[in-house]
Amino acid sequence: MQTLPAQKHRHSTPEYTTHSQAARETQSQIQKESHTCLNAKSPPKDGLSGLREHWKADIMSGFIVFLIALPLSLGIAMASGVPPMAGIISAIIGGVVVSLISGSHVTINGPAAGLIVVVLCSVERLGGGTMGYKGTLAAIVVSGAILAVLGLSKAGELGKLFPASVIHGMLAAIGIIIMTKQLPYMLGVSVEAKEPIALALAIPSMIAHLNPAIAIVAFVSLLLLIAHGMSAHKLVKKIPAPVIVIAVAVALGSCLGLDKPHQYQLLGVQHQIEPLKCLIALPKNVMDGIVLPDFSHLNTYAFWLSVLSITLIQGLESLLSCTAVDRLDAHRRQANLSRDVAAVGCGTVVSGMLGGLPIIAEIVRSSANVSNGAQTRWSNFFHGLFVLLALLFAASIINKIPLSALAAILIVTGYKLTAPRVFKEIHEIGIEQTIVFLTTIVATLATDLLIGVSIGICTKLIMHTVRGAALSNLFTTRLNSQAQPDGSIRVAVSGALIFSNYLSFKRQLDKIPQGKRVLVDLSATRLIDHSVMEHLHFYSEEYSRAGGSFDIVGLSRHESASRHPLSARRLTTGTYCLPQIGSSR
C-alpha cells in the first residue's frame, strides 16, 4: 500500500476561488516571505504586548484597510437598501469592538457584499423603507445573539457540514444578484423590476433611458477598476483600487454638477440631477444616524426567515474568511473559530442596536491587511478607529461620493463571485460538483438563499445515495482506530466518507494526540467526496506542521471523478486513479 506526499496543485479551495480572488492574489506574495518569517522569529505577541511591539505596522496597515473599507461599507449599505450610516456603524463596531474579543489574529471585521442580498430581502419582506429597515435591525440583533450562542457552544466547526459546491453556488448566485441590483444605480435610472431575471431583461430599457452624467461617472469608475486589476505596476498596486475610483469619481462628479440640483439636455432628451439621489447623504449630526431596532415583527414568519438567512450567510462567510486568512498568515497562526463566531455575533448585536449592518470576517479587507504588513488584531482596531474619525471629521467629503461609483465597485465585486473562471474551476473538480453548483445557483435565483442552499445540499445527498452511500451512513461514519506495534495510529474507514458525516469522523481524529504517526486507511471506503478530500488535505498539513505525520492510504482501487487531485473518489477496480494525498515526515 503506497503512500505519496501531498501534491501541490493549481486548483483553488472555496476560500481561494469564489469566496475571494483577493485571497488568492495575496497568497503568493505572503508565501515568498513566510518561510523566512517563520524561521526568523516567533509569532507576534497578542494583547497589549503585541500593540507595544507592532503598533507602527498595525497603524499603517489599519489605515490602508480603512481606505478600502470606507467606500465598500458605504456601497454595501446602499445596495442593502439601508442608509449609508448603517455601513459606517458596522465597520466601526467590527474594528473597535470585535477586534478586542475575536479569536483571529489579522482578520478584518465589518459589513460584506455577501450579506447584501439577505439584508435587502429582509428590508423588503418586513415592510420596506424605514419600517423594513427597523424590522431588519431587530432581525440582525437576534441573528447576532444566535451566532454568539453558537460560538460559545463551540459550534465553529459546523461550517464544514456545507459542501464546497453548494457554497460556491450560493456565492455565485449572490454575485449575480448584486450585479443586476446595481445596474439601475450605475445608469441613474429607476425601474420597477426587483428580481434578478426581471432586472436582466430590463437592461436594454435601462440603457435607453440612462442619465449620461451619472453613467459617465460609473463607466469611468468601472474602467479604472478593470485597469487597476490588469496593471502590473508596483506603485499602482500599492494604491487600493477603491481609493483611486472614489478620488476620480468625486472630482468628476463635481465637474458634471452632481452636487447641485439641475436639469440638462443632451441629444434632445431632458435629464435631471438630484444630489440626494445620486450622492452619499450622511446626517449632519452623527446621533441622527443612530436608528433603534423595531421588534414588533418578532412573532411573524417573515421575521424569522430573515433571522435564519442572515445567520446562515453571516456564519458561513465568517468561517470561510477566517480559514482563508489563517492560510495567508505568514506566522501560520490558527484562529479559534468558535470564539471568532461568538465575537462576530456579539459585535452584530451591538451594530444592530445602533442601526448597523451584520458584521462578518471580511476576506477582501483581511487580504489587504495581511499583504500590508499587519501583525496583530490591533490593525483591525485601528481600521475601525480611522472609520470613526472619518465619520466625525470628514463627513462633508464623504457626502460628495457618487452612488454610481459605489455601484461600479459592487458590480466588480459581484463579478468576481461569478466569473467564468469560477465555473471552469468547479467543472475541473468533477461533473457532480458542476451539477450541484449550477443547481444551487438556479434554485437561489428562482427562490431565495435559504431554499437555494437547502436544494443544493439535498441534491448533493441524493447524488451520494445514488453513488452508493447508505442512508444510515449519511450522518455517521464507520471507523476503527487502533494503535500499531510501531507506535503509529491506524484509522480504518468503511462505507462512505462525505461532507455530512465528516464532523463525526473529525471528532475521532481530534482525539489522537499531536506528534503521532497517523495512517488513515480508506481502502474499504466506498465513496469519498470532494469536500472530505479537501478537509483531509488541510488537516494533513496542520497535523504535520504541529510535528506529527498524517498519511492517507488505500486509494489505489478508487476511481477519481476527474484529474483534480482532490476530486471525489469511488471504490472500483480496473480504472484510472490518482495517487493518494498525505504527508510524510
Image: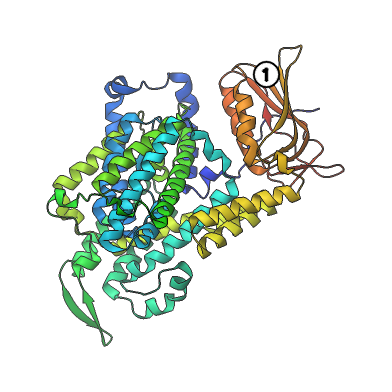
**Closest to the observer, 186 or 496:** 496
Please provide percent x and percent y for residue 277: 23, 67
Where in the figure is residue 167, as x and y percent of width and height?
54, 49
Q: Which residue occupies the foreground of this view, 296 or 111?
A: 296
Residue 22 visible (yes or no): no
Measured from the top left, where is residue 289 in percent x and y? 19, 51
Q: Residue at x 34, y 80 (%)?
A: 209
Question: Residue at the spot x=32%, y=60% of the render?
Answer: 81
Residue 182 picture location, percent across and down: 37, 64
Q: In the displayed structure, would residue 330 be above or below residue 186?
A: above
Farthest residue to the right: give it.
574
The reply, left or right, for residue 344 in relation to residue 201 is: left
Specify the farthest residue to the left.
285
What kind of residue is marked 1? Arg
Position of the C terminus, as image quadrant, is: top right
Say which element carries label 1.
strand
Q: Which residue is mark 1?
A: 517
